[in-house]
Amino acid sequence: MTIANVLLVDDEVPFVETMTKRLNKRDLQVSAAFSGAEALEKLGKERNVEVVILDVKMPGMDGIETLREIKRRHPLVEVVMLTGHATVETAIEGMKLGAFDYLMKPCDMDILISKVGGAAARRREQETKIVEARIKEITMRRA
Amino acid sequence: MTQKDGSTHGYYRSLTRNIVILVIVVSITPMILVSGLLLYQFQNSYREKIYAHLGEVVQKHKQKIDGFLKERLDDIRFLTRTFTFEELSQESFLQDRLFTLQEEFGPVFVDLGVVNERGIQMAYSGPFKLGRALYSDAEWFKKAMTREYFISDVFLGLRGLPHFIIAVRENWKGQSWIFRATIDFVAFNTLVENIRIGQTGFAFIVNKDGEFQTRSLLDVAACKDIYLDLLSEGKAGENKMRIVERSDSTGKLNILVADFLKDNDWLLVYQQDSADAFADLGKALRWAILINLVGGLAILTMAFVLSRRIVKRIAEADQEKNKMDEQIVETGKLASIGELAAGIAHEINNPVAIMVEEAAWIGDLLEEEEFKESGNLDEFKRALKQIRTQGKRCKDITYKLLSFARKTDPREQDVQLNELIEELIALSAQRAKYGNITFKTDFQETLPTVMVSQSEMQQVFLNLINNSVDAMEKRGGVIEIKTRLEANEVVIEVKDNGPGIAKANLGRIFDPFFTTKPVGKGTGLGLSICYGIIKKYEGEIEVHSVPEVETTFRVKIPLSKDRTDLTSA
């Protein structure tokens, strides 16, 4: 089993490509999207995405907007924000909207892996809880 | 540029001139109008008053003189009525009468005489030996024979002294005879001479030919023509008092008051030098002129001084405004440069991130088996590490650029000033290193946080540090920063051993746009912004400088209210 199933969203294509390769090498299942809209589309198709790594500054639909939409449509998907420069305000806003964490670009791979891992773990934990709740519900119904 | 200076110079000069002219016209015109009007009115009424006064004096004396003449005439007529020709012809009787008259009226009557119709004096009583004198050719005798009584003009007569005669004609046994009395010239003169007003005012009597009937005290020959004029006017016109002002042949202006006496035979003239008569008026006029002159002079001086001062102020203000305009443009320029820098920093960030990422990917790939044997593996790793290090350096630079170009964040929060200053020192370290400047810190470890805006505090202390670095850039030195808690205030001292601040500038360094840096280098805003920020937190910022030794900026920021309560509790 991979550490996490990740969707990497950034408008900088070379960055996404290199990042994808590097993350793949570290036992992460990575798919890429180059805009907010594409990310939402992919999330709609690939239901097994656990963590989204989302760049804040993108043309068109920006990171914050995309985050809001992701959380609305797929509340269980965890999001790690990636910012070009650490502005406290952006980070705070992201957290309020339900982001798991934020990272500064260029970022240390180990930190990234650990944060993504954390996000995936939480996601799985949530899922497990939901599954358990369902089973409980079903067994109760039988009873 | 010189042409521009010349034109502005001309502009200020014409401005000065306009203000001067305006002030002078506005202040002097009413002054002259009012004083002129008052003076004119005063002169008129004063003249009327003088005229009335003189008229009254002359009127009174005319009545007095007329009365005198009539009384003397009545005395003589009484004698002729009471006594007969025969009685009066006796010299001893006549002597008695003269004696009685002199006893009664004083030495007014000089002598008495009885003259028959052929002009022979039949009897005489008096001091002169005039018995049997023949008057048939005398002017007065001829006139006296034609009327009932007659008062002569003053003449010298047989005795060779000025006198005049009162003669009364009577009939006795079909023959006319004349009783005559000589009136003492001196006694009569006093009647007129007593009229003396001022220094030049005097009176006299002239007859119809312009001959003087009394002594005139002053030389009045120069005015003779005027008297003749007055006489002829009197004859032509009505018999009433006239007051005129004429200049005599020497050009002096005189007031003349004339009235006829003795049935229009004589003219009583009062004459006074106008300047003397209107002495008070002249005095008032002189004062008015003096006051006007002094006032005018004061206005002139004031107009010049005031307008100079005003224009100087205006020029200074203009200059300041120009300077400020320049500096505002400069500030605007700086702001846009800051924005540009922020934009560039942001754009550079992404490619740098990609480069670092790619290098890291190569690093990942080198871990693969196939490269393990490569002889240059270590060299590859070293190069990649270098790329990563330099990428991080780029990141740091852009990070700093961005965080300072960012709009200031005015939100107040708990700020640990020690940390904040430490960060700022790190920022300035590079520049300081080039200038051979070292930082020394002495922080109180337990310094409480203060409730301020982080970015504003950064601004304040970065400005202070930058100023010190700027000041010592050429010679190097030490910047010492101390923090401590002092009675509910956090005190931060930034001390350098640079060239210091000139005493003359010490009072102005917090003024906006005051700078000693060359044009284009400093905006003169740094310290004034610091001042504004510190004042906003009810703190204090002060400076102590000993030129060539050291300069200390001391900033005091009070702890927020609740914290103050805590520490004091």
Image (cartoon, coloured by chain):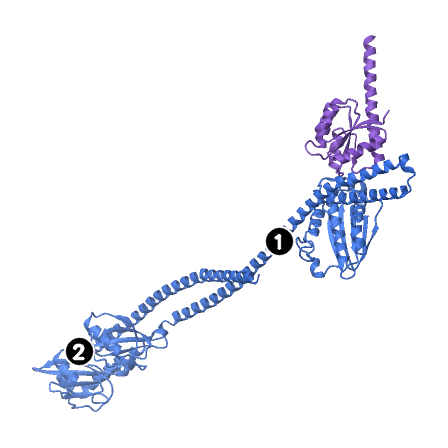
Q: Amino acid at mark 1?
A: Glu
Question: Split into 4 quadrants, where in the image is the N terminus of chain B?
Answer: bottom right
User: Both on one chain, marks 1 and 2?
Assistant: yes
- Relative to B7, does residue B361 appear above or below in the rendering? above
Give the amino acid type for the residue marked by disc 2 in the picture: Arg
Q: A39 left or right of A22? A: left
Q: For mark 1, give the secondary structure.
A: helix
Label 2, on which residue? B77
Picture coordinates of residue B485, whole percent (x, y)? 81, 47
In the image as oriented, which residue stretches furthest toward the right?
B373
> Which percent across, then down, holds residue B57?
30, 71
Asked whether the viewer can see residue B487, the reply is no
Q: Quadrant of residue B410?
A: top right
Kindly report the distance in space between the C-alpha atoms of the residues bearing marks 1 and 2. Answer: 114 Å
Q: Residue at 76% across / 52% down in the picture?
A: B465
Residue A64, can we see it?
yes
Farthest residue in the left direction?
B174
Please name the color used to draw chain A: purple
Q: Nearer the viewer, mark 1 or mark 2?
A: 1
Which residue does the numbered mark 1 point to in the structure image?
B326
Compared to B368, does B295 lie above or below? Answer: below
Crowding at label 2, few (<14), some or many (≥20) Cα neighbours within 10 Å?
many
Which lettered chain is shown in blue?
B
B28 and B173: which is toward the camera: B28
Q: Which residue shows up at 57% across the image and 63% down it?
A: B2
**Image location of residue B202, percent across then percent down:** 32, 77
In the image: residue B201, left or right of residue B339: left
Say what secondary structure mark 2 lies in.
helix
Letter of the chain that mark 2 sits on in the rendering: B
Chain assignment, label 1:
B
